[in-house]
Image (tube, grey):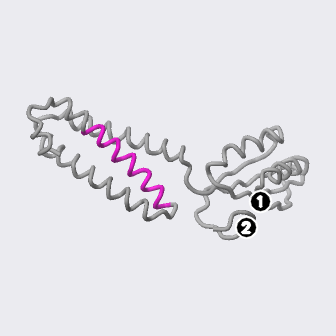
Amino acid sequence: MSQFLDTLGGISPILVCLLVCVAKIVEITIQSLKTCMMVKGQRLKAAALGFVECSIWGLVISTLISTLGDNFLLLVFYCAGYATGLFLGSTLESKIALGTSNLELIASDDSTVKITEYLKENGRGYTVLEGHGSKEKMNMIFVVLPRKEAAKTLREIRRTCDGKVFVAVSEVSKYAGGYGMVK
């Protein structure tokens, strides 16, 4: 990248800083997505993103090393790009919502009926286990669904039973079988 910048002639040092910052933002955003894809088993996509990430990193680091002695502000922009890229990458990944979630709901008999009716109406599989809470009989309801649908489903379940449900959400890395969830 430094040779490319040299061919542009007397490019402003602040413009170099901005280019490095933007490149670093893109690189780290890609890195965040790549890591999530690796964890979720999407190896081919992760490898492709890794290639792009590594290419950008090579260009950025060569510029940083070759000009850092002349422009300390470059390091500040590099760090700002890194931090911004982490933020954007995690924000983008939460919007894409890769993967599968497991909802564990603990509810009374009345709320369990409302929740299971909602799940049936929406074509969701579930499992109900009877249990005992500290004061009364409770039920555990397990639901596995795409992560993108978890927030909406939770909102609707909490609305359906007036918030009288305990919820624990976790990521599912692997599963097989189940109603509508064969993978």
Residue 67 vs residue 49, the one in the foreground:
49
The mark tally for this picture is 2
Identify the residue under disc 2: 178
- Mark 1 lies on a secondary structure that is loop
Quarter in which the C terminus is drawn = bottom right
Residue drawn at point x = 73 percent, y = 55 percent: 104
Amino acid marked by disc 2: Gly
Residue at 69% of width from left, 58% of height from top?
144
The residue lying at 79 percent from left, 61 percent from top is 127
Q: Is residue 170 left or right of residue 123?
A: left
The image quadrant of residue 78 is top left
Q: Which residues are magenta?
A: 20-39
Q: Is residue 139 left or right of residue 77?
A: right
**Does the segment drawn in magenta span residue 27?**
yes
Dot 1 amino acid type:
Gly
- Main SS, magenta region, reads helix
Q: Which mark is residue 125?
A: 1
User: Is residue 82 left or right of 87 when viewed as pictured?
Assistant: left
Point 44% across, 45% down: residue: 89
Q: Nearer the viewer, residue 106 or 41?
A: 41
**Residue nearer the viewer, 135 or 14:** 14
**Secondary structure type for disc 2:** loop
Q: CA gap, disc 1 to disc 2?
A: 7 Å
Residue at the extreme front: 8
Contact? badges 1 and 2 (CB < 8 Å): yes
- In percent of width and height, residue 49 lies at 38, 56
Q: Position of residue 23 (x, y in %)?
A: 29, 42
User: Is residue 36 depicted above or below 157 in this figure?
Assistant: below
**Label 2 Cα neighbours within 10 Å, binned few <14 / some 14-19 / many ≥20:** few
103 horizontally vs 21: left or right: right
Task: Give whichever of discs 1 and 2 has the lower sequence position.
Answer: 1
